[in-house]
Image (tube, rainbow, N blue to C red):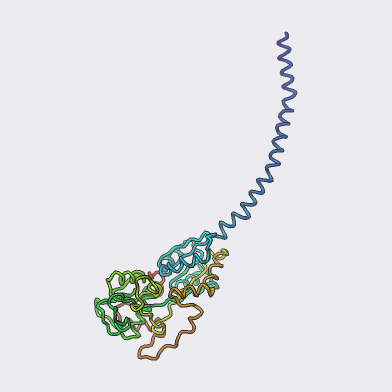
C-alpha cells in the first residue's frame, strides 16, 4: 500500500508542476529571444544598408578595346588606387565587344576604338545618347626599327626604300584606315606582295618587332618612350595627313543606374586624365579642335569616304565592307 500511495503522490506532483515548469521554460526562452532579436535586427540592418549596396553600386563592368589595354590598366589604378571597388575589365576587339553587347553581355560602360560602334548602340537603344563621349584621340606612327638606322623614317616611306610594309586592315580598323589615308595623301603606293595586313594594330606591331615587315604603321602609344625603341626610328604622322581617330565611350543600358559607371565616364574627361593619356601618346580631347589646318596638296583627305576612294586606287586593299559589316570588324 505504501508503494501505491508513493506512486500516486509522484504522479500528482508531476501533474501539478509540469505546466509550471513548461511555462517557466517558455518564459526564459521568450526573454532570451527578446534580448537576441534587437541584435539580429541590427546585424541585418548593417548588412542590408551598408554591405548589400556596396555589392551593387560599387561594382563596374567595362568593355575596353584591346588597343587601349596599357592605358586602361594605368587609368584603373588612378581611378581606384585603394581597390575599394569591384571593377572588372574585359578586353577585345571593338567589333567582338560590340557583338557581345548586342547579345546581352553584362557591361556597364563600353570604350571603343572608334565612334561608329557606340553610335550604333545608341541607335539600337542599348546605350545612353547623353552619355556618349570622346575619351581620347588616337595618334598614328610609322615605325622602322632596323631599316631606318641612320636614315630618316619619313624618307624611307616617301622614297619607298622597303620591300614590305605592314598596316592594319583599312576596311576593318580605324588605325588601318588612317594609315591608308596617309599613304594616299603622300602618293605612296605598293606593289603586289609588298603590303602585309594585320587584323589589328597589335598584330602590326608584332610584324614589325619580329622583322616580318621592316616598316609599319602602328599606334603611337605602342612605341613612344618604350625601352629599346629609338626615337629616330619612329615618325609621328602629322594629323593633317589622315582623318581623326576618335575613340568614344558610352554608358550602356545596364549601367544607367550605376553611380560608379557615371563617375568613371566623368573621370575619363577630367584634365588630369587627359594629361595622363597625352603622356602615353594619345591626343587630349580638349586639344583636338586646335589641330593645324590641312595643307593644300594635289590629294586632300577630307573625310573617310574620300580617303577610301583615293586609297583604294593606290593601296593594295579592298574597301568593300558596308557600315554594318564594319560594326563587327576587328580593330
Quadrant of residue 103 within the rendered picture: bottom left
Expressed as whole percent of the image width and height from the top left, the position of residue 16 reads 75, 23
Residue 324, percent from left and from top: 41, 72
Q: In this view, does 302 lie above or below 147?
A: below
Which residue does the image show at 51% across and 64% down from the upper left? 108
Q: Which residue is drawn at 46% across and 84% down?
A: 291
Find residue 166 and report its image quarter. bottom left
Image check: 263 left or right of 166? Answer: right
Which image quadrant is residue 56 in?
Answer: bottom right
Q: Quadrant of the N terminus?
A: top right
As drawn, 327 above or below 89: below
Q: Nearer the viewer, residue 272 or 225?
A: 225
Q: Residue at x 37, y 82 (%)?
A: 307
- How many discs appear? 0
Front residue of this view, candidates 11 and 176: 176
Q: Is residue 268 left or right of residue 221?
A: right
Residue 249 in the image: x percent, y percent?
A: 49, 71
* Residue at the limit of the structure toward the top, as seen here: 1
Query: Considering the image in quadrants, where does the C terminus appear?
Result: bottom left
Q: As displayed, is residue 271 above or below residue 30?
A: below
Amino acid at each position: 500500500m505504501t508503494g501505491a500511495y508513493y506512486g500516486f503522490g509522484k504522479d500528482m506532483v508531476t501533474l501539478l508542476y509540469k505546466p509550471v515548469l513548461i511555462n517557466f521554460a517558455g518564459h526564459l526562452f521568450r526573454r532570451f529571444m527578446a534580448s537576441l532579436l534587437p541584435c539580429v535586427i541590427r546585424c541585418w540592418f548593417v548588412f542590408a544598408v551598408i554591405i548589400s549596396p556596396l555589392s551593387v553600386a560599387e561594382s563596374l563592368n567595362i568593355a575596353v578595346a584591346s588597343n587601349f589595354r596599357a592605358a586602361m590598366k594605368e587609368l584603373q589604378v588612378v581611378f581606384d588606387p585603394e581597390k575599394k571597388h569591384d571593377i572588372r575589365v574585359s578586353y577585345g576587339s571593338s567589333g567582338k565587344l560590340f557583338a557581345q553587347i548586342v547579345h546581352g553581355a553584362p557591361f556597364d560602360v563600353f570604350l571603343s576604338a572608334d565612334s561608329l560602334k557606340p553610335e550604333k548602340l545608341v541607335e539600337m537603344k542599348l546605350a545612353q545618347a547623353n552619355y556618349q563621349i570622346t575619351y581620347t584621340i588616337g595618334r598614328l606612327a610609322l615605325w622602322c626599327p632596323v631599316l631606318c638606322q641612320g636614315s630618316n623614317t619619313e624618307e624611307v616611306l616617301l622614297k619607298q626604300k622597303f620591300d614590305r610594309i605592314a598596316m592594319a586592315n583599312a576596311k576593318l580598323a580605324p588605325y588601318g584606315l588612317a594609315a591608308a589615308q596617309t599613304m594616299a595623301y603622300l602618293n605612296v603606293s605598293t606593289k603586289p606582295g609588298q603590303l602585309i595586313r594585320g587584323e589589328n594594330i597589335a598584330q602590326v606591331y608584332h610584324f614589325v618587332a619580329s622583322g616580318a615587315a621592316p616598316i609599319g604603321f602602328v599606334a603611337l602609344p605602342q612605341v613612344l618612350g618604350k625601352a629599346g625603341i629609338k626615337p629616330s626610328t619612329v615618325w609621328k604622322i602629322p594629323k593633317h595627313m589622315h582623318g581623326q581617330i576618335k575613340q568614344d565611350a558610352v554608358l550602356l543600358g545596364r549601367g544607367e543606374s550605376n553611380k560608379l559607371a557615371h563617375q568613371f565616364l566623368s573621370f575619363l574627361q577630367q584634365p588630369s586624365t587627359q594629361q595622363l593619356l597625352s603622356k602615353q601618346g594619345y591626343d587630349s580631347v580638349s586639344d583636338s579642335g586646335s589641330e593645324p589646318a590641312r595643307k593644300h596638296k594635289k590629294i586632300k583627305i577630307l573625310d573617310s569616304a574620300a580617303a577610301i576612294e583615293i586609297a583604294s586606287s593606290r593601296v593594295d586593299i579592298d574597301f568593300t565592307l558596308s557600315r554594318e559589316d564594319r560594326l563587327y570588324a576587328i580593330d
